[in-house]
């Protein structure tokens, strides 16, 4: 039941019931043999008032005893005078018991709601602390990572022997991994916050991402898209594709291909990141498909796929992963088309034509 928050409204409701109860009690006494309606109106009114106002336990017990005594005395008086049968007086203890059961259930419900509110508050505080920890940890890690990288570069410049260069290369690689994990933590926290959806030229966006990544690794880069404008968040879409490309780079070699493509299908558009690298065994693929957000896997921390799932889920889409050991990996993001579809903004320059393909180490044109 709901409790009326305003104490003045609650008092007025109780006063109205008290006036009704007095009128009904008088009617019960003065109209013997026809007291059934008035008797039940008293109890119904009491149940309604109890449900919609705040009662202390002592007041509730006092009111219940008062109502039971008054209505019970009237019924006993009428039964003794022969107006009603004695069996009708059994309504009094039955109504009292029924009201007592109702009070007990309401009390239990209020206790349960209070417990739910306490647990919700604990969970809210836990999430706040967790988010604050991730933000602070990510922020505090950036400075020492930058300093460590600077000193490592300085050591490499001062000592050109092969052993030092090899050792410092390992240090730099580990620092880069730590920096990427830090950035992904920040991205994952930002994904949970609301972000405006705008119109994105998916064709140009994939071309730009491919051009940005191609100088970083010697791969056969292929980009193809004929989707056009879609409703999405530019920053989050880029973060999701970056995570997929980084995973593809991790499990491919110089002779492998990384393909970024997008196409339209009935009611949706599909963005695909495919590579011809090492792929995944069946058990690893199953763990990746059903892994929880951020849960470590055999292939890494799991933060990248958690970001991708969050981005795709915010757009109402789904992620599909196909992979075989030695046969590469294909990740598809299927995003439903919004209705009406977004209108492309006015542009002064024409977009580059598709498809296009880039060779090893060359930037997409």
Image (cartoon, rainbow, N blue to C red):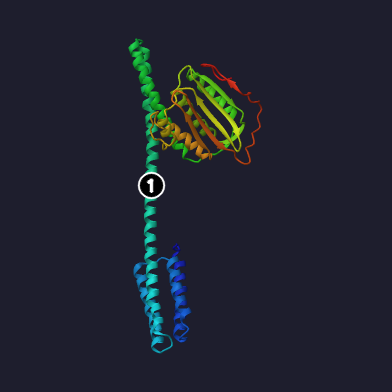
Q: Is residue 151 above or below residue 232?
A: above
Q: Where is residue 278 in the image (x, y as percent from the top left)?
A: 44, 23
Which residue: 34% across, 69% down? 58
Q: For this view, does 35 lie left or right of residue 159?
A: right
Q: Callout 1: few (<14), some (14-19), or many (20+) C-alpha neighbours within 10 Å? A: few
Which residue is at the front of the view, 189 or 229?
Answer: 229
Closer to the camera, 356 or 351?
356
Closer to us: 38 or 177: 38
Q: Above or below — where is 137 with respect to 207?
A: below
> Residue 155 appears in which quarter of the rendering?
top left
Q: Where is residue 49 in the image (x, y as percent from the top left)?
A: 44, 69
Q: In which quarter of the image is the N terminus?
A: bottom left
Identify the residue under disc 1. 123
Residue at the far top: name it.
161
Which image quarter: residue 336? top right
Q: Where is residue 238 in the image (x, y as percent from the top left)?
A: 52, 30
Q: Does dot 1 land on a helix, a strand or a loop?
A: helix
Q: Is residue 201 visible?
A: no
The answer to whether any part of residue 140 appears in the image is yes
User: Is 151 on the left or on the right of 252, as rendered?
Assistant: left
Q: Residue at x 37, y 34 (%)?
A: 137
Along the line of sight, the residue nearer the viewer: 59 or 363: 363
Q: In this view, does 318 lie above or below 104?
A: above
Number of marks present in the image shown? 1
For the C terminus, the image quarter is: top right
Residue 74 is situated, as x and y percent measured from the top left of the image, at 40, 83
Q: In this view, does 321 lie to the left or right of 141?
A: right
């Amino acid at each position: 039941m709901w409790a009326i928050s305003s104490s003045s409204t609650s008092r007025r409701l109780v006063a109205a019931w008290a006036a009704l109860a007095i009128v009904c009690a008088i009617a019960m006494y003065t109209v013997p043999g026809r007291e059934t309606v008035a008797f039940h109106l008293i109890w119904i009114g009491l149940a309604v008032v109890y449900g919609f106002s705040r009662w202390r336990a002592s007041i509730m017990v006092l009111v219940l005893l008062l109502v039971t005594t008054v209505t019970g005395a009237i019924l006993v008086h009428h039964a003794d005078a022969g107006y009603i049968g004695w069996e009708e007086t059994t309504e009094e203890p039955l109504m009292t018991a029924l009201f007592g059961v109702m009070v007990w259930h309401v009390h239990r419900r209020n206790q349960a709601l209070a417990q739910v509110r306490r647990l919700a508050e604990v969970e809210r505080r836990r999430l706040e602390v967790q988010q604050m920890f991730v933000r602070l940890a990510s922020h505090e890690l950036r400075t020492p990572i930058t300093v460590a990288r600077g000193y490592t570069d300085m050591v490499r410049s001062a000592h050109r022997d092969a052993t030092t260069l090899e050792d410092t290369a390992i240090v730099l690689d580990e620092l880069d991994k730590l920096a990427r994990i830090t950035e992904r933590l920040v991205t994952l926290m930002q994904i949970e916050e609301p972000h405006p959806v705008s119109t994105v030229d998916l064709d140009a966006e994939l071309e730009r991402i491919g051009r940005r990544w191609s100088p970083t690794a010697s791969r056969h880069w292929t980009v193809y898209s004929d989707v056009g404008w879609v409703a999405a968040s530019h920053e989050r879409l880029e973060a999701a594709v970056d995570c997929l490309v980084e995973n593809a780079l991790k499990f491919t070699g110089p002779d492998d291909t990384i393909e970024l493509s997008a196409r339209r299908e009935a009611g949706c558009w599909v963005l695909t990141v495919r590579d011809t690298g090492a792929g995944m065994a069946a058990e690893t693929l199953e763990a990746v498909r059903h892994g929880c957000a951020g849960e470590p896997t055999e292939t890494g921390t799991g933060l990248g796929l958690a970001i991708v799932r969050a981005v795709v889920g915010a757009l109402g889409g789904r992620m599909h992963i196909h992979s075989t050991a030695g046969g590469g990996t294909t990740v598809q993001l299927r995003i439903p088309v919004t209705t009406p579809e977004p209108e492309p903004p006015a542009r002064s320059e024409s977009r580059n034509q598709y498809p296009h393909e880039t060779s090893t180490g060359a930037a997409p044109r």
